[in-house]
Amino acid sequence: MSSQVLIASNRGPVSFSMSDDGTLTMRRGGGGLVSGLSEVARDGDLLWVCAALSDGDRGAVRLAPGGRLDRAFDAGPVRMLDIPPAVFHRAYNAVANSTLWFVNHLLYNTPFTPQFGIRFRREWESYREYNGAFALALAEEAGPGSRVMVQDYHLTLAPAMLRVERPDLRIAHFSHTPWAPPEYFSLLPDDVAVEVLSGILGSDHAGFLTARWAEAFMDCCAVFLGARVDRESRTVSFGGRTVRIGVHPLGVNGEALRARAAEPDVESHIAAIKDVVGDRKLIVRIDRTELSKNIVRGLTAYREFLAGHPEWHGKVVHLAFAYPSRHDLPEYREYTAAVQRCAKEIDDEFATEDWDPLILNVHDDYPRSLAAYRLADVLLVNPIRDGMNLVAKEGPILSRRCALVLSREAGAAAELGADALLVNPYDVSGTAAALHEALLLPEEDRAGRCARLREAATAFPPRRWFDDQLAALDHC
Ligand code: F6P
């Protein structure tokens, strides 16, 4: 049995930016998937195959023999695929982020989308091509009997494609997103739904962050493929093969996070935040400006809370981080504008000369967000739907006393629900009431909840999460 492991994901552990004079600067990649996997990718016989996402990345690939960055940069064992930009754009922006992401997060809500016409068919063809490029690279790189860990909704077709090329490999697929129930998955054209599901079933093991998303996937396999689903053993039989379905919640490496949050740059942000907030209570949220994160409803809930509770005026500050995300998509640009409009309205309505009720941070500032976690009295995490949501786990690790207001639709609710204040993310008034309740939680209750949340948040750190999947794959 080979000990070689290959990881395949759209975004890789590093990215490059190119300055005007052509100099390349390497940065660590961001996001839940990348930070989880980066921690495990450092050890052992491992190769990470990812896509070039930008001109900087493409520049780096061209300098690296065979796209192997470790041979040209000090990047660890990474192979970056130089997929033609137009194909990449259609696969990533149009199919992965505007279609599969929207379906799995239940985001369609306008009379104009979705529309699956000729244009979509072209985009779908690019998605196939993009998945094919990964399958080919993995087939080239993998030694006999290697284990291949394919990640997420960008790469649903790659497992089946890879199996055709290399039946000797052991293949796993992992979904970092929720999975839609069949009634919503049925928005996809039938042939596309079938291709996505049977693409994932090309693997030996299909993993999900919670039992709820795994169940939804199995429901879709039964409805759209007529597959035989055994809920007890969590297996799906289709096309003469049986695939094991796994549930692997991802948590946080508490020690590493605490060490990072104790560094001097975080300490100086703590001092700066304290200067502004003083002894007022602090409500914190930290998100990418992402439609599924439900930032506008969260801000509106804060506004309702302020309107209904004048006794809190001047005594509370909401520090909201809304980092830029996916600005190639018009929906995200509009959403960013909506978040900023909503923040301005709150400011116009409530701010006084010596009190800013809301501070909105729209630039990526990791050390400042770590400082905010450490100071939070209340952490608001209210996504419409989320595969897991690591913010809900990081907060209690860094704060001894923060109360967590958490959407019941976040995957993290399965593990943290008992000690969080759970909300329906669409219920703005309910969220406003939960913010109030969280602010009033007695010290002892809040510390007890926080300690239990911390324990749950660190139960499955990335190393364990990944090793459990490898072990499950070995038993397939
Ligand atoms: O939830 C899936 C996920 O891959 C996260 O891990 C990550 O935060 C996000 O999507 C990344 O999106 P993108 O690579 O498009 O920025």
Image (tube, grey):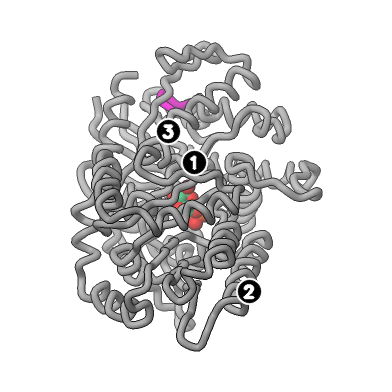
The picture places residue 433, in percent across and down from the top left corner, at: 51, 53
* Residue picked out by circle 3: 210
Asked if disc 2 is less than 8 Å from ligand 1, the answer is no
Circle 2 — which element?
helix
The picture places residue 383, in percent across and down from the top left corner, at: 52, 50
* Mark 3 burial class by Cα count in 10 Å: few <14, some 14-19, many 20+: many
- Residue at coordinates 41% horizontally, 35% vertically from top-left? 414
The picture places residue 413, in percent across and down from the top left corner, at: 42, 40
* Residue picked out by circle 1: 408
**Dot 3 amino acid type:** Thr
- Residue at coordinates 54% horizontally, 11% vertically from top-left? 228
Can residue 291 be spotted in the picture? yes
Contact, mark 1 vs mark 3 (Cβ under 8 Å): no
* Residue picked out by circle 2: 345
Q: Earlier in the sequence, mark 2 or mark 3?
A: 3
**Dot 2 amino acid type:** Glu
Circle 3 — which element?
loop
**Magenta-drawn stretch, dominant element (helix, strand or loop):** loop
Write the start and end of the magenta stretch as one range: 202-206
- Residue at coordinates 65% horizontally, 51% vertically from top-left? 94
